Amino acid sequence: RRSQFAAVLFLHLNPFTLFGMCGSGAGIPLLLDAAGRFGESAETRFAQQVVCTASFVTWASLTATKLLHKPISSPPIHRAKTIIQGVGAAACLAPLVVPVFSDFTTLVYIVVINALIV
């Protein structure tokens, strides 16, 4: 542990991580339902916003949490992991900025980004 301040920040980041996970759990079924009912070209902006924002919040809070840990073995690897998580978090917002994503492509994109981060 780095300090008492870092411990308090770590504690306060937990609700954001949980909020992001809950948002993903709520938004993914919306995307699946819309894509299943209306085909792969369906666009449900609300569901896309929920999934992308939730994924961003999850990865941003996990990145901040990682920054609060001391690297145990290799500081450069620790730093690289935080950079990858941060860039991945920002990449989760791409379907909100680029309006060419359907519900199905948004879902596939978010799954691929999450797999690449991990």
Image (cartoon, rainbow, N blue to C red):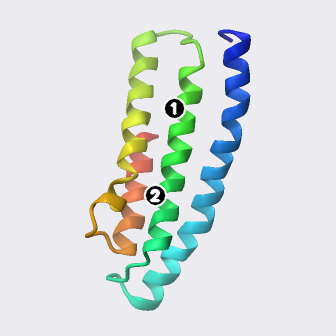
Q: Nearer the viewer, residue 12 or 75?
A: 12
Image position of 17 (left or right of 4): left
Please tell me in which quadrant of the rendered image residue 77 appears: top left
- Circles 1, 2 touching at the beta carbon (< 8 Å): no
Q: Secondary structure at mark 2?
A: helix
Q: Estimate how packed mark 1 is, as few (under 14), some (14 to 19) or many (20 or more) residues with alpha carbons within 10 Å.
A: many
Residue toward you, 51 or 36:
51
* Lower sequence index among marks 1 and 2: 2
> What residue sits right under mark 2 in the picture?
52
Q: Quadrant of residue 62?
A: top right
Counting labels gives: 2
| Residue 37 coordinates in the image, percent (x, y) | 47, 90
Q: Name the image quarter holding the N terminus.
A: top right
**Residue lying at 30% horizontally and 69% vertically, measured from the top left:** 101
- The image position of residue 42, as x and y in percent, is 37, 83
> Which x, y percent locates residue 31?
49, 74
Q: Residue at x 62, y 53 (%)?
A: 21
Q: Relative to 61, is 56 above or below? A: below
The residue positioned 52% from the left and 82% from the top of the image is 33
Mark 2 neighbour density, 10 Å: few (under 14) some (14–19) many (20 or more): many
Q: Secondary structure at mark 1?
A: helix
Please tell me which residue lies in front, 48 or 107: 48
- Left or right of 64? Residue 14 is right
> Which amino acid type is shown beneath numbered disc 1?
Thr
Determine which residue is flagged by label 1. 63
